[in-house]
Image (cartoon, grey):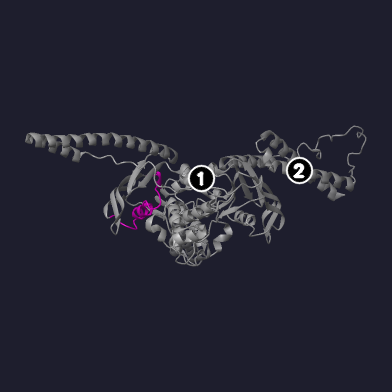
């Protein structure tokens, strides 16, 4: 059944045509990605689909009785608590519960017919509450809130006191709990960490709702949408399959269209030449028959449906990153780095090594300490303990995540001239490579969009020629074309890269190793996001297996009831209830040796030199875990001495 449809939709803002002849249909349960570059008209189309605006021409039709939920801007909930905001969508159901409480109070003093009436009304309210899923509300709220990373302690806070990212998550949670028939989601993964984004992907796949999503998150699109509507030049093109196949089909369609365009141009050229010849023959022979043929041919040419010349390569940022000399072999070294704020530990004995030319991506949940680690690399903060050092001849270039543009009226051109130390003519040429054309260079920096500000900072960064790039969420605010241009430039970059990112597509393409910051521990995995995810699954399975069995299996243990204790040679006459106490000094020496061996194995596991030797790493990891388990046993024995 049709959920929503656009037919011949046109939309103008002043004299500018934003949408031209947009037509597509979305059916019940479909998951649709609405794609297009910045300024393609996605936000305008979203407002039309949600009913906030009406088309100037054409129609937008919604299934009768369908409810629509929109995530595009943060509502104003005032001083209401987060918990109240999440429960708002269940207001009618919760009113039934409140009515039951009122009836319970009334039944306490009622008698006879009045009591019978209250009992009957109470039963009806209880049945309606149960039928509406009232008893499941707390579980639903908990599942969605925890899935999106909204902690339980946050629910008592006033919504108005939350950060922008926290408000977005709460608004998204409330929208999902509302169970609307049609969900319109604008960049839903913004402000979500990877765990929350993965949860949202699963929710969308399993949801019976029809969902239209605008997103630049390519991994998210790959995991969720089964249909793509692309806006280009004010027109919509429908691809009835997922994101990966859409990319392949789009390229194939463009090539087919280009071939059709070339063939038609040949025919048009031949027809024009024939018309010209017929007119000349008519003039020479004064024969109206040739003029009639020329006119007939011209009419056929005018009626011909022209194939639009496809744009095979649209303008994208021209990013070419260069280095100003190379560094030493070891670019960034962390040895036992510890960092805490009060009782909150961000880094605990962190160890890591980044060599010249390597590309590492630092991941972790919101608040895990990623930005703090970047600030320590920049020298803006110091470790509480341990050693964090840069190698020789390191020249750092830093792209901060939340850096805001200057609030003055400085223009794009003046800002770039000052930051890049470049003359106006060359500055305008360089800015054009980053899609600042003509009058765009005179825009005030304070008024730039997020994508424009990111492009400008990348232009400045490219001019600095660093040999160590520190990038904090570099793909934020960039459209897909700009993200791909950035990734291509980073792949060709000769220097070393340490990036913080939640963009899983970016991680898979760029990362040679992943540094995961979890609970104060810094763990390295060779490869991209998929390899990290596989390693994490293995670690979780190993932890579950350890829980399922005795952690000291294979070690000497107390005998089970009814079994005979094991004896060493010569011990057969030893009383079984006798406790042997070893020399504390010997225990301390053995513990010290085991700790030294565990530390040695930890360094070996962290050394990138051995990163490709999976068998050796597995053996070392097993030995390290065995040593640590043995240390625990000996420490308990030492404590009893």
Q: Which residue is mark 2?
A: 600
Residue 641 location in percent, x, y?
87, 49
Q: Which residues are the magenta region?
A: 28-55
Residue 478, placed above or below residue 597: below
Residue 449 falls left or right of residue 341:
left
- Does residue 354 appear in the picture of this structure? yes
| Disc on the earlier residue, 2 or 1 | 1
Residue 248, placed above or below residue 51: above
Identify which residue is drawn at 56% across, 40% down. 530
> Residue 543 falls in which quadrant of the image?
top right
Residue 30 location in percent, x, y?
39, 43
Q: Nearer the viewer, residue 541 or 609?
A: 609
Q: Which residue is mark 1?
A: 489
Label 2 and label 1: CA atoms lie apart by: 38 Å
Q: Does 45 appear in magenta? A: yes
Residue 264 location in percent, x, y?
26, 35
């Amino acid at each position: 059944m049709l959920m929503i449809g656009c037919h011949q939709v046109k939309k103008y803002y002043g004299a500018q045509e934003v949408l031209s002849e947009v037509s597509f249909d979305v059916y019940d349960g479909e998951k649709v990605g609405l794609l297009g570059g910045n300024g393609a008209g996605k936000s305008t189309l979203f407002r039309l689909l949600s009913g906030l605006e009406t088309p100037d021409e054409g129609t937008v039709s919604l299934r009768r009785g369908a409810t629509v939920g929109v995530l595009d801007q943060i509502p104003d909930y005032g001083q209401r608590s987060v918990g109240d905001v999440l429960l708002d969508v269940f207001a009618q159901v919760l009113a039934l519960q409140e009515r039951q409480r009122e009836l319970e109070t009334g039944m306490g003093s009622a008698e006879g017919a009045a009591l019978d009436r209250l009992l009957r009304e109470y039963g009806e309210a209880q049945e309606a509450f149960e039928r509406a899923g009232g008893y499941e509300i707390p579980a639903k709220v908990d599942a969605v809130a925890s899935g999106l990373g909204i902690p339980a302690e946050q629910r008592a806070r006033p919504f108005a006191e939350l950060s922008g990212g926290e408000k977005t998550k709460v608004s998204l949670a409330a929208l999902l709990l509302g169970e609307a028939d049609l969900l319109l989601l604008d960049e839903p993964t913004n402000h979500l960490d990877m765990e929350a984004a993965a949860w949202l992907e699963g929710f969308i796949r399993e949801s019976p709702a029809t969902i239209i999503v605008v997103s630049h998150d390519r991994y998210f699109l790959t995991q969720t949408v089964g249909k793509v509507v692309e806006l280009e030049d004010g027109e919509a093109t429908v691809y009835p399959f997922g994101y990966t196949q859409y990319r392949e089909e789009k390229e194939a369609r463009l090539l087919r269209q280009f071939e059709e365009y070339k063939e038609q141009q040949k025919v048009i050229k031949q027809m024009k030449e024939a018309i010209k010849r017929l007119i000349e023959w008519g003039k020479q022979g004064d024969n109206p028959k040739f003029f009639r043929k020329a006119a007939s041919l011209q009419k056929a040419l005018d009626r011909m449906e022209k194939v639009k010349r496809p744009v095979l390569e649209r303008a994208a940022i021209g990013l070419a990153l260069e280095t100003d000399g190379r560094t030493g072999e070891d670019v960034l070294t962390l040895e036992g780095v510890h960092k805490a704020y009060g009782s909150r530990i961000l880094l605990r004995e962190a160890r890591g090594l980044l060599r010249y030319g390597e590309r590492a991506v630092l991941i972790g949940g919101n608040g895990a300490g990623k930005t703090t680690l970047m600030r320590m690399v920049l020298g803006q903060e110091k470790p509480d303990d341990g050693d964090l050092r840069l190698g020789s001849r390191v020249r750092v270039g830093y792209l901060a995540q939340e850096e805001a543009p200057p609030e003055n009226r400085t223009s794009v051109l003046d800002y770039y001239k000052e930051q890049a130390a470049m003359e106006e003519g060359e500055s305008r040429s360089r800015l054009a490579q980053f899609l600042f054309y003509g009058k765009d260079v005179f825009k005030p920096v304070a008024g730039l969009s997020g994508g424009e500000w990111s492009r400008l900072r990348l232009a400045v960064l490219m001019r600095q020629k660093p040999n160590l790039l520190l990038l904090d969420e570099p793909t934020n605010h960039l459209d897909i074309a700009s993200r791909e241009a950035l990734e291509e430039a980073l792949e060709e970059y000769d220097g070393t890269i340490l990036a913080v990112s939640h963009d899983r597509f970016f991680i898979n393409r760029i990362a040679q190793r992943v540094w995961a910051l979890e609970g104060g521990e810094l763990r390295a995995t060779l490869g991209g996001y998929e390899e990290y995810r596989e390693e994490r699954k293995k670690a979780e399975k190993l932890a579950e297996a350890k829980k399922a069995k005795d952690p000291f299996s294979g070690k000497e243990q107390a005998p089970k009831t009814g079994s005979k204790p094991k004896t060493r040679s010569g011990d057969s006459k030893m009383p079984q209830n006798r406790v042997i106490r070893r020399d504390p000094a010997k225990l301390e020496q053995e513990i010290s040796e085991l700790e030294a061996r565990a530390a040695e194995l930890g360094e070996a596991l962290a050394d990138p030199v051995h990163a490709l030797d999976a068998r050796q790493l597995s053996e070392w990891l097993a030995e390290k875990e065995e040593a640590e388990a043995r240390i625990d046993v000996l420490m308990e024995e030492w404590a009893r001495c």
